[in-house]
Image (tube, helix red, strand yellow):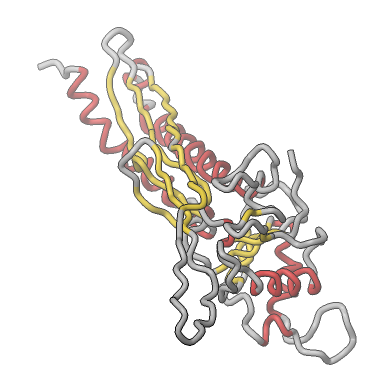
Amino acid sequence: MAISRSQLVKELEPGLNALFGLEYNRYENQHAEIFATETSDRAFEEEVMLSGFASAPTKQEGAGVVFDTAGETFTARYNHETIALAFSITEEAIEDNLYDRLAARYTRALARSMSNTKQVKAANVLNQAQFAAVTGGDGQPLISANHPLATGGVFANVLATAADLNETSLEQSLIDIAGFVDERGLRIATQGRKMIIPKELQFTAERLMKTPQRTGTADNDINAIASMGMVPEGYSVNNFLTDTDSFFLMTDVPNGMKHFVRSPIKTAIEGDFDTGNVRFKARERYSFGFSDPRAIFGNGNLPTS
């Protein structure tokens, strides 16, 4: 009894899927150090920033209580993208028993391509964080000194003067984060929890955050950042950051950097009647972005276009 094309495809499918899954899972998901992942069941997601109330005033005896109003200030939108790639194996290659050799190599390459695209798209949110043309819901880039407040003022999540990573710039960043305010200008208790750096700064970060004494000095001063536990989650290297002297501090502000998964990665395989080729495809839909810019702080070294 002759083996039909559909039967051949069914025989190939388990091997291809197993190889793809094994290879893809080996990659470190560096975006997870920056973004909180949520699922989506729509073509896009929107998140609305709400303003709270102003500071409560003193009520004079016999006077009426003051009423305040809260409202929406801006909307952050996440537009999902479809990422897909495919390859095919010829009928002749299958006939000549080249399936094992070719499929293993191609599925590894496909997994690398899918993973690389995801990490590049995630890192580009930071790489383009000061691009004037790439703005969030409040009309400002992710890293900006002019994020508008409901009160008419602004707040900054960037150093007043751009600086490379050193003890002074890191300490000033932590001080600035501790001074964050909400949409109505009220102080919020915020701290830096993790530093995100390119590979070029990993040695500097290690010395700054883990040595018991201050770096670059003969004095016996303690390393205040380390002894006070100011960045409790340490630092994480992102190999897809393109600016070699920029660093970012993730804060403990919720609803900030987000990764929405509309459709998790799926693989499909089918045979083509005309050519006899077997085609394999990988596809997923997702988006990366940010809602509340208070979730991150930058040193200001990024390009603006």
Q: Residue furthest right?
A: 218
- Asked if residue 52 shows in the view, the reply is yes
Q: Quadrant of residue 173?
A: bottom right
Q: Quadrant of residue 273?
A: top left
Residue 68 coordinates in the image, percent (x, y): 47, 66
State the residue lying farthest toward the top: 274
**Residue at the left extreme?**
1
Q: Name the residue rendered at 53%, 60% in the picture.
A: 33
Along the viewing direction, whichever of 284 and 275 lies nearer the viewer: 284
Relative image position of residue 20 (x, y in whole percent) = 38, 41
Query: Left or right of 135: which side holds 74?
Result: left
Tag count in the figure? 0
Residue 28 in view of the camera: no
Q: Residue furthest front?
A: 62
Q: Quadrant of the N terminus?
A: top left
Asked if 39 appears above or below 2 in the picture, the reply is: below
Residue shown at 63% from the left, 54% from the top: 148
Viewer-proximal residue among 83 and 273: 83
19 is higher (above) or lower (below) than 292: above
Q: From the top left corner, tell me how far across and down residue 266 is, in percent.
A: 33, 38
Q: What residue do we see at 84% from left, 92% from top? A: 220
Q: Residue at x 49, y 51 (%)?
A: 27
Q: Position of residue 181 (x, y in %)?
A: 60, 68
In the rendered view of the protein, which quadrant contains the C terminus? top right
Q: Is residue 150 above or below residue 95?
A: below
